[in-house]
Image: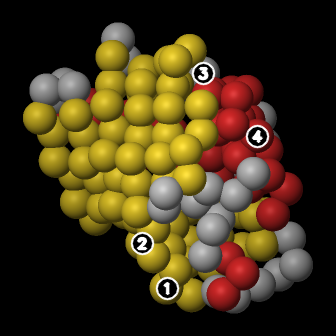
């Protein structure tokens, strides 16, 4: 996968995840049927990821992701990005995320990520994996 193609895929997934008008199932369309995610030690299969996406959409009213760095090696994409969001209660949250995506046939097969809370309540630390 070429660098710009990889950047576009990651940005589309992040934008869909943070857009309240996009359903969790629509976000899931970017993931392969055998999708697996490990985020801060929490492991989710595809159904768990969809549950996570629904939960995130019920907490975050709006948000945006900005990719700081992206590296591509064949079907592997590593992204360092910042996510900023406004929660439904009006508070804000910002996280820095380092994610390694494996892709196949234009879909994300797995994600291994670590997130760091920059701004927000201590209870927001698990937003990357909360179900």
**In this rendering, would 22 be left or right of 110?**
right
Residue 62, quarter of the rendered image: bottom right
Screen quadrant of the N terminus: top left
Q: Which residue is mark 1?
A: 118
As drawn, 59 above or below 96 = above
117 sits to left or right of 29: left
Residue 21: give x, y in percent of width and height: 78, 42
Return the residue at label 4.
51
Q: Image point 42% across, 72% down: which residue?
A: 96
Colour scheme of this structure image?
secondary structure
Q: Are marks 3 and 4 in contact (CB under 8 Å)?
A: no
Q: Earlier in the sequence, mark 1 or mark 4?
A: 4
Tag 3 secondary structure: loop
* Left or right: 13 as drawn, with respect to 9: right
State which tag comes first along the sequence, 1 or 2: 2
| Residue position marked by numbered label 2 in the rendering | 96
Q: Few, some or many C-alpha atoms within 10 Å of disc 2 (few <14, some 14-19, many ≥20)?
A: many
Under circle 4, the secondary element is helix
- Dot 4 or dot 2: first in sequence order is 4
Quadrant of the image occupied by residue 63: bottom right
Marking on residue 29: 3
């Amino acid at each position: 996968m070429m660098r710009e193609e990889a950047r576009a895929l990651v940005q589309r997934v992040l934008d869909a995840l943070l857009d309240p008008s996009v359903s969790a199932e629509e976000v899931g369309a970017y993931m392969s049927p055998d999708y697996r995610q490990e985020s801060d030690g929490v492991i989710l299969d595809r159904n768990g990821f969809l549950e996570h996406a629904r939960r995130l959409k019920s907490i975050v009213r709006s948000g945006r992701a900005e990719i700081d760095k992206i590296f591509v090696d064949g079907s592997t994409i590593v992204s360092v990005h910042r996510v900023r969001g406004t929660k439904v209660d009006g508070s804000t949250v910002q996280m820095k995320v380092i994610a390694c995506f494996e892709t196949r046939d234009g879909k994300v097969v797995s994600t291994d990520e670590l997130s760091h809370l920059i701004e927000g309540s201590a209870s927001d630390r698990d937003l990357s994996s909360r179900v």
